[in-house]
Amino acid sequence: MSSTVQLFRQTFKRDLTLAFRRKSELINPLIFFLIVASLFPIGVSPEPNFLSQLAPGLVWVAALLATLLSMETLFKSDYEDGSLEQLLLSPQPVFLVVLSKVLAHWLLSGLALTLVAPLLGVMLFLPSEGMPGLMLSLLLGTPTLSLIGAIGAALTVGLRRGGVLISLLVLPLYIPVLIFGSSAVQAAVTGLPLDGYLALLGAMLALALALAPIAAGAALKISVSG
Amino acid sequence: MAQALLTAQSLFCERDDRVLFDQLQLTVSEGEIWQVEGRNGSGKTTLLRILCGLSTHYEGELFWRDESMDEVRDQFLSELLYIGHQAGVSAMLTAEENLHWQCALHPSLDADRTQYALESVGLKGFEDVPAHQLSAGQKRRIALAKLYMSRAKLWILDEPFTAIDKIGVAAKEALMVEHIQAGGSVIMTTHQDLSAGIPLHTINVERFASMHKEWSE
């Protein structure tokens, strides 16, 4: 048992180290997130009333796309240098390593996006009542996005141009998260109770936590076998 | 009679409408070194990947210690050391960090011997250097350091000596002889000639490819 915990921790540490040594990949999703939010008022309309209506959906769409963009790198370098082969030949359970990698990835993408989100909210005139809803829904929703994205990344890691394919595979599964996520923010803005939306986001997260690592592990086996 | 470790029965593999090998038989017993021979593209790497279970594009049966591979896969993996064509070394990590993760993945690697292993492959003083700053040979040596830490029974090595100098090769050969004397075995591919003193079994992949052609014509 302790060796599996050890593996989980080691993988987590390794992936964080790797991420911090590749700084550009680290800040890419954040920059993208900020650019989308800052271009919108310029491109559409700087009108506060108009923007505050768009804000819940806009922040969520930007977060979703930023996560999607960052997914491709999750297994790419491991595939290229052969680390993935070593991983699949380990007697330890593969889903554990996948879970650990996704956690590290989420900390630097999803969680970072969640922490920056209030700034975007302010830029887009999101009423301050909406902030808790925004933070909470992103906190529960972005890990689901990362977990589902990991399946897509695992399936396409062996392809030379997998980026577009990931989007096609994964976007349909992202839609429910987007709907309930942005609805939660909307509800918070209008003063309606959030519980229902958050419960649904939590349920989706629980489902993804249980199934996605196993699915991604199986997908990795298929990709490496090709 | 030494115990049979890995047995392959009537392996068949086809790639891009080309039969790489058919009816390939191989039994690797304790204390044997097997060299897989064949020209470039003849399917040596494919065979090794099939044997260790990375590739599933084959027909035929694999046995580990006379039991079907499907049933004893975990047991097999815990006794396997595989160094592939891609060495499994992350360029952004140092030699030590690479080996630490490998130890966590493979309990058959002895983490306490990391320093000794790095010293043995001549990477002492380079422990803290990211692998991308090292030469090709040094990078390869990070992967080969695992040989010094391994308690695995079977070593499957794909071109382990690429970019390794003569002294390094001699040291690894001595290590392999030590390994088989302790009851282990090795399956490897290499285009370099091994020293004459090593007891070597060879299997040529191309032999199994041509056989099929005769039949189909």
Image: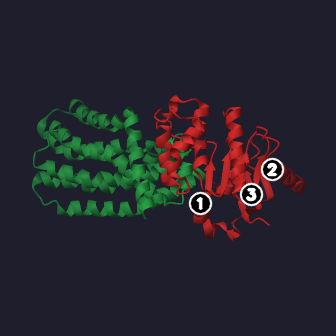
Chain colours: A green, B red
CB contact under 8 Å: marks 3 and 1? no
B176 on left or right of B125: right
* Callout in the foreground (2, 1): 2
B175 on left or right of B98: right
Residue at image coords 44%, 45%: A74
Which amino acid type corresponds to the residue marked 2 in the rendered image?
A: Pro
Q: Chain of mark 3?
A: B
Q: Which residue is mark 1?
A: B77
Where residue A219 sits: x, y (%)? 51, 55
Where residue B183 sits: x, y (%)? 70, 59
Q: Chain of mark 2?
A: B
CB contact under 8 Å: marks 2 and 1? no
Q: Which residue is mark 2?
A: B199
Which amino acid type corresponds to the residue marked 3 in the rendered image?
A: Gly
Which amino acid type corresponds to the residue marked 1 in the rendered image?
A: Leu
Q: Nearer the viewer, residue B152 or A148?
A: B152
Nearer-N-terminus badge (3/1) = 3
Q: Residues within 10 Å of mark 1 (few under 14, many from 20)?
A: many
How much space separates mark 2 and mark 1, taking CA atoms? 26 Å
Nearer-N-terminus badge (3/2) = 3
Query: Residue A6: which numbered mark, if any?
Result: none
How much space separates mark 3 and mark 2, taking CA atoms? 9 Å
Please indicate, yes or no, whether residue A56 appears anywhere in the rendered image: yes
How much space separates mark 3 and mark 1, taking CA atoms? 19 Å
Q: Which residue is mark 3?
A: B31
Q: Residues within 10 Å of mark 2 (few under 14, many from 20)?
A: few
Q: Chain of mark 1?
A: B
Q: Residues within 10 Å of mark 3 (few under 14, many from 20)?
A: many
